[in-house]
Structures are given as structure tokens and as C-alpha cells.
Image: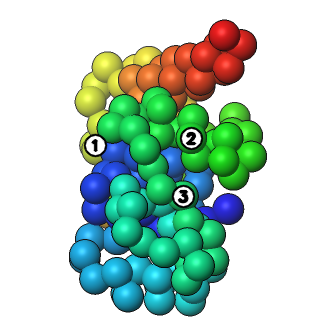
Amino acid sequence: MKFLVDFMLGRLCKWLRLLGYDVSYFVSDKKSDLIYQSLKEARIILTRDHRLSKKKAIKLVIINSDLLEEQLEQVFSELNIKVDPDEIFTRCLVCNEILQKVEKEKVKDKIPTYVFQTQKEFSYCSNCQKVYWKGTHWDLANQLLKKLKSDKKN
Ligand SMILES: [Zn+2]
């Protein structure tokens, strides 16, 4: 599932990438371009703009909440999608590129010493060279997912 997220939803964009989704970030406010890109790349539009017509886009979700958790919940429930834990941290949060696994010796000079000593698995983005590991963000992602799951039970 691919998304096109408008400029008002920057955090949602990053978190969907973190969960492994292919997300383009749309920074212009030209609505015709937004629709055009979504059709050309077969992306579902996520927007806060209530004036956008649902008829023109392939699929469009108008996000109601300002809160990240509620935004994610709305996307998952409206589109009926479930997060695949294996897909978490497979994409660069900055440029949406698929991450490559890398041996830690190769990224030694790019990461803090304590991370090198304590972490085992590393991946990196071949586009922006950013290195990722199962640290703070990983914990945050799991906390968020647990929260989303437990919210549904209530
Ligand atoms: Zn990158």
C-alpha cells in the first residue's frame, strides 16, 4: 500500500515510513499536482484538507485528528490494514528509500560508541547514508503499536 501525504501531516508521514510503508511527502499546496501524483503513482492520499474532492483521487482519507495516534488509527481502520512487524524499520524515515542490512563494522565510524557496543543489527540508507539500529525508535514503535492494539479493545 502506497501513500501520498500532504505537508500538514509530516509526523504521520515519518511514522508510516517507520512502519514500512512507501510514503511520498507532498510539500506544495497545489491541489491539482497532488491529485496528479496520486494517480500517476497509484498512491492513496492522506490529507487534512476537507475541500479535496474524493471523486478525483484514487482513494483519499481526510485525517480528522491532530494527534498522531488517532491519525494512525484512522488510516488503519478506514483502509483496513494491519501493521506487519517484519516491515518495521525497512525504510528510511527521511527519504523513503528501502534500507539495506549492513555489518556493524562497516558503520562503526558513523555511530556512537555505546551503540556500536550494545546493538547487533544495523541497516543504512543508500540514498542519504543514514544508519539505523533497533534502539530508541524501535522501542517507540513497539510502544505505539501496543497502544494502538490496546485502544481497540476498549
Ligand atoms: Zn535516506
Classify mark 3: residues with Cα within 10 Å, few (<14), some (14-19) or many (20+): many
Q: Which residue is mark 3?
A: 61
Three-letter residue code for mark 3:
Val
Placement of 148 over or under 18, stated as above or below = above
Q: Position of residue 54 (x, y in %)?
A: 55, 72
Label 2: how many residues lie within 10 Å, few (<14), some (14-19) or many (20+)? Answer: some
- Picture disc at residue 74: 2
Name the residue at 44% across, 18% down: 118
Residue 65 seen in the current view: yes
Structural crowding at the residue carrying mark 1, measured as other residues with C-alpha within 10 Å and reported as few (<14), some (14–19) or many (≥20): few
Quadrant location of the N terminus in the rendered image: bottom right
Element on which disc 2 rests:
helix
Q: Earlier in the sequence, mark 3 or mark 1?
A: 3
Residue 45 sits above or below residue 115 on the image = below
- 122 vs 137, nearest the viewer: 137
Looking at the picture, which amino acid does disc 1 mark? Asp
Q: Position of residue 93 (x, y in %)?
A: 40, 51
Q: Look at the numbered disc 1 and give the secondary structure of its residue.
A: helix
Q: Residue furthest toward the top?
A: 154
Is residue 57 or residue 134 the one in the foreground?
57
- Position in image of residue 17 (x %, y %): 49, 51
Indicate which disc, 3 or 2, sits on the residue closer to the N terminus. Answer: 3
* Residues at marks 3 and 1, CA–CA distance in whole angstroms: 42 Å
Assess whether mark 2 and mark 3 are in contact (beta carbons under 8 angstroms).
yes
* Residue position for label 1: 109
Residue 87 shows up from this direction? no
